[in-house]
Image (cartoon, rainbow, N blue to C red):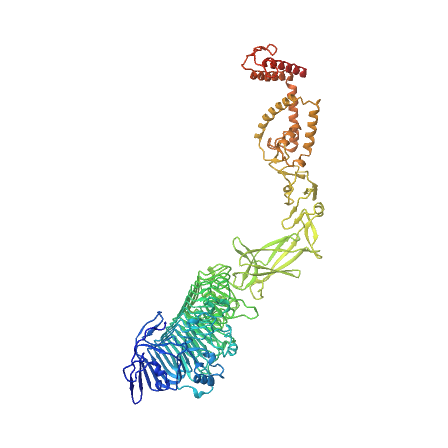
Amino acid sequence: MESRSIVFLLCLCSISGALAKTWIVSPTENCSRANCHNLSYYTGDPSLYFSTDTTLIFLEGVHYLYEPVTISGVSNLTLQGEGILQDGSHWTVRESTVVIHCLNSEAGLFFVNWTGITINSITFESCGAKIINESQLGSDINTHYSSVPYGWEFGVGLQAYHTLLFVNGSDLTLESVTVQNGTGYGLTIVNSYDITINRSYFYKNNYRYLCNESYDQAGGNIRITHLPLLSSSRCPRVKEIESVILIRDTRVSFGVNQRICDPYFMASSENLTTYARYTLPVGGGIGLVAADYSCNKFRYKLENIVAYKNYAYYSGSNFALIFYPVPISISGMLSTRGFTASDCPVQDPSSIMSKGSGMIFSVFDSLESGINSELNITGLVSSNNIALIGSGLYISTHTKRSWSSINIKSSNFTRNNVRYIGASAVYIERRDIAEISSSLIVSLTDVSINETVNSLPNYENPYNGALSLSNIDCVINGLVIANSANIRGLSLASSRVFVQGDNLIHNNTALFGSGGGVYMDPYSYFIFQPPANLTFSRNYADQYGGGIYISPRANRVFSPPCFFQIDSLLPLPEVRLIADGNTANITGTFISGGELVYCFFVTNFYYSYCRNSPQLSCSYNVMQNFIVPNTSTQDRFFISSVPVAVLLCNDSDNIILYVRNKAVSVMPGQSFALKLVVLSETYGIAPGKIHSSANGVTTTNSIKANCTEISFTYYKPIGVRNIHISLTTDQSVAYIHQSTTPLCVNLTYADCPPFFQLVSNSANSSICGCNRYISNATESAVCNINTTMITTTYNEVTNWIGYDNNSSCTFVGQCPFGYCKDEEVTFTVNDVDKQCALDRSGVLCGGCAEGFSIKLGSNECGQCSNGYLSLLLVFGIAGIVLVIFLILLNLTVTIGTINGLIFYANIAKIVEPILFQTDSILVLSQFISWINLDFGVKVCFYDGMTPSQKIWWQFAFPIYIWIIIGKFDPKASLKKIMEFRLSNDSNTSSASLIPNEGTADDTQVVDTGYVSADSQVPKVKRYSKYRNSALDLMDDFIN
C-alpha cells in the first residue's frame, strides 16, 4: 500500500499504575489530554516508554516513524492498535486502520533480548532499516554471531533491511498485524521461541527488487532463523521443554528475496559449508532457517496459511525450511504461483537451478540421536508454481538421519509447471547416502498430483516425473497421478514403494522417453501390502513401457529384486496390478525392460508360493497371476523385458518360428535376408542388437520391436564351400529357455550365374563379378550379384551382350547402328532385349519383340493390325502419280538430271542416320525414300510382318511401277491428257466460251479484235498455234 497522505488525529493519554504502565499514542502533536504525545515523542527515549510491563495503545490513524528504533531488554511489552481490519489493495491482504508509516528511507522497530512482546491490530507500511546503522545492535551481533559456523550473514544477512526485527527472545504474539511495501524483510525473528503469528498479513515486502539483478537484496515477507550461539547462557528461557513457533490464519504474498548467489551452492552439504557466510536466497514468502537446535528444542506449526506469488532467486519462493530436520506440521495451506529467477524475463531458465517454488525442505545435518522428528503435511494445496525441479514440493536430505517420517495427507498438487530435464511437481530425495537402513520414510495418503506441465519437453531425463522419488521408502495409499502434460507420472531411483489401498496413475506422457506411467531403475520396486491395487490407465511412452518401464542392469551376474513384490503370508492375497489402455510407440504397452523373470522376492511371499516350484521363473509366474487383464489374452507387445533370443518370424501373420537352424544358399558376395525378431525373457517382442558371428568376424545390427528383415553379406573364403553363422543378442544367457540358444545359419555358396565369374575381393575371399568377356568389351559395365543385373553405359560404340544357354557362352558384339539404346541400360541374362531400341529384340536386336511387327519406311517395330492393308489402295494411286510425274518432267535415264538425282538420293539414304539422325527432317527424308522407290512412310502394314518380309515388299512398289508403264498405251494416254489440259487453258483465256465440236486440227477461232499489248495479235489465234505445236512435239516424243 502506498504511503498515506492524510494524517488522522489521535490523542494520547497516560494511565499509571503500581505495576504496569499504559501509554496512549496520538497521531498528531496536539493532544489536549495529559501525557498525550505522538509516536516521535515516545521513540525519542525508547528505554523509558518502550519498557517492561508497558502497554502502548495506538489509536486509529497514521503514525509516522522517522528512524530505526532499538528496544532492548524488555519484558511484557504490548503495542495495541485500536483500529479495525479492512480489505487491502489485494485479496491476500487486510490492513488495520492503525498505521505506522515510515517516512524516511530507513526506519523500523528492532527488539533485542526480550520476553513477552505482543503487537495487535497495527499495520506497518513502507518501512525497513539496516541493523548496521544501530551501533549497539551491530556490536552485539558481531560479538555473538560472527564466529559461529552458520552466523548472521548465513541466516539473515548483515546488509539486509528489516521492518520488524526480534532477536534472542521468547513469547512473541503478533495478532492482526500487517506488514506491507517494506524494504528487505517484513518480519525477521532470530533465535527466538514460543512465537505466535495469528491472523496477520505480509504483502509486497522487498517487492521493488523483483527480478532486478542490479540489486542484490535479501528480503521477503517472513524470515525466522535459529543460529548457533557461542554460549548457551544467551539462550532465551522458554515455557515448555519444546517450544512452538505457530503461524496461523496468515497470508504472505508478493514477497521477494533477491539475494543473488551461485545457483549450485546447495548441491551438497560440503558446498553449504563453503557458503556458510552467504545469505540463503530462499523463502520469499516464509523462510525458516533452522541452523541450530541445541539452544532450545522447538517445532514449527503452520495452520491455514496462504502463500501467493512470492519470489526467491534460488528456491522456496512461497515457503522454505533449511538445514536441520526440525519437527514441523503444516495443515490447510495454500501455496500458489510461486516462482524463481528462472521465470524472470532476463534469466535463462537453464542457468538457474531453482527448486521448490511452492515449498522446499532441504536438510543438511542431523538432529541429536534419539530425537523423534516428523514432517507432517495435511490439507496442502500447491498449484500453479513454477520452478525447474519440484515446483510444487521439493524435499531433499543430505544426511543419514533426517525426519523419522514424512507424512503428506489429503493434499493436492495441481498445474505446477516444471522447466528442466529433471523436472517434477513433487520431488523427494535422500542424497549422498548409500545405506538402505537409513532410508527416508515418506507416506503419501490421499494425495493427488494433477495436470503437471513440463515446459521443456524436448529434454528427456529418465528420472523426471510428476512425482520423483530418489532413495526413498514411500508408502502410498490413495495416490492419484493424472493428466500430466509432456511428463511421466512417477519416477523411482533406488526407492521402495509400499502399495496400500487403491492407487491410480492415469493419462501421463513420456513424450521423448520410456515409462509413461512410471520409470524405475532396477533397484526400485513396489511392495504390495494387501488389500492393495495399483492401476495404470491410458499412459503413453514414446519409446518403451506405456505403463511401466524398468531400466536394465549393466551387470547380470546377480539377479535383482523383482519390481513386483507382495508382503503377505496368504497364498492368494487381495492384490491387483491393473492395466487399462496404456500405449508405447515401440513395445511394452504395459511393461517393458528390466528383469521380470529371473528376479527374486525380498519378502517371504515367494517362498510360500514357489517353495516347491522347480521353475526358475516362478517369480514371473507370481506376477502374472495378479495382473489384470490376464497376460495370456494380450499380444506379445503387452509385456516385454530384457532381449535374450533371436528368432525367425513371419511378418504377414506375426508368427514366431522356434527353430534354431536355418539353411541358406547364396552366391559369393550375394546378400541374403532373414526375417528376424528379438524375443525377451517374457516371450514378448523387444528391440535389441543382433550379433552375427562367422569365421571370427562379428557384425552387429540393431532391430526394432517387430518382425524385421535384415540383410547379411558374406564373401566366399578361398577353398570353402560352407560357413556357419551364429546370431545372438547382448543378453543371451545359459539359464534361459532353449529359444535363447544362438540361431545357427548354415550358409552354402552356389555357382556364379551367367555373365558372372569369381573375382578376388581380398587376399582370402572372392565374390561374383563381371566375367572377362564383358569386362574386356566395356569397362563401364557394372555387375550386381544381388540382382544378377548388368549395367552398361553408352559410349561411342554400343555393344550388345547376350548369352547362349546351350553352349553357356557369353556373346559380345557391336550393335547395328540405331538398333540398341544409346543410354545406360540395366538387364539380366533373361532380358537382354532391354538393350534394344525401337521395340526390337533378338541377337544384335535384329528382330522385333514378341507381338510387334516391323513398320514400313523405318527400322522401328510396333503393334500392328491387318487393317493397315488398306494402304495398298493409297500406294496404288501413288504409283500412277509417280509415273505421270516422271514423264511430265521428262526424267528418263538418258537425261543427266535423273542420274544425278538418283545418285544423290542413294548417298543420302545411306548416310541418313548420321546426317539426319532418326528422320529428323521429315519431308526431305520422305522425298529421298521415294526417289529410292521406298514407301517413305513410317507406318504399320500388317500384323506379323518381319524385317525380311519388309525387304521383299520394298521390291513390290518398283515392280508395280513397271507394270503400270507396260500395261497401258502411253502415247494415247499422254496425248489425251495434254490435249485436255491445253483445251482448258485456251477456253479460260478467251473472252467468251466457244464450243469445240471438232478435233484439234478443226478448231474454230473467232476473232474478237482483242490483241495483246506487245504483238497486237488476236489472243485466240496465237494460243491455238501453240497448242498444235505441243501436240506435234508429243507425237514425236511417243514415237
Does 906 appear above or below 1024? below
Left or right placement of residue 499 versus residue 1018 in this view = left
Image quarter (top left, top right, bottom left or bottom right) of the C terminus: top right
Image x and y of residue 555, in percent: 57, 69
**How many numbered marks have been drawn onto this rendered protein structure?**
0
Q: Residue furthest front?
A: 30
- Quarter-of-image position of residue 443: bottom left
Q: Residue at x 70, y 52 (%)?
A: 759
- Residue 91, given in percent of the width and then of the height, sits at 35, 69
> In the figure, residue 839 lies in which quadrant?
top right
Query: Relative to the observer, which residue lies in front, 951 or 395?
Result: 395
Which percent across, then down, holds residue 189? 41, 80
Residue found farthest to the left: 32
Left or right: residue 933 compared with residue 171: right
- Say left or right for 73 vs 708: left
* Outermost residue to the bottom: 18
Query: Can residue 57 be seen from the camera position used here?
Result: yes
Report the front residue among 570 and 460: 460
Asked whether residue 240 is in view, the answer is no
Instruction: Tell me where residue 669 appears, x and y as whole percent.
Output: 66, 53
For the N terminus, the quadrant is bottom left
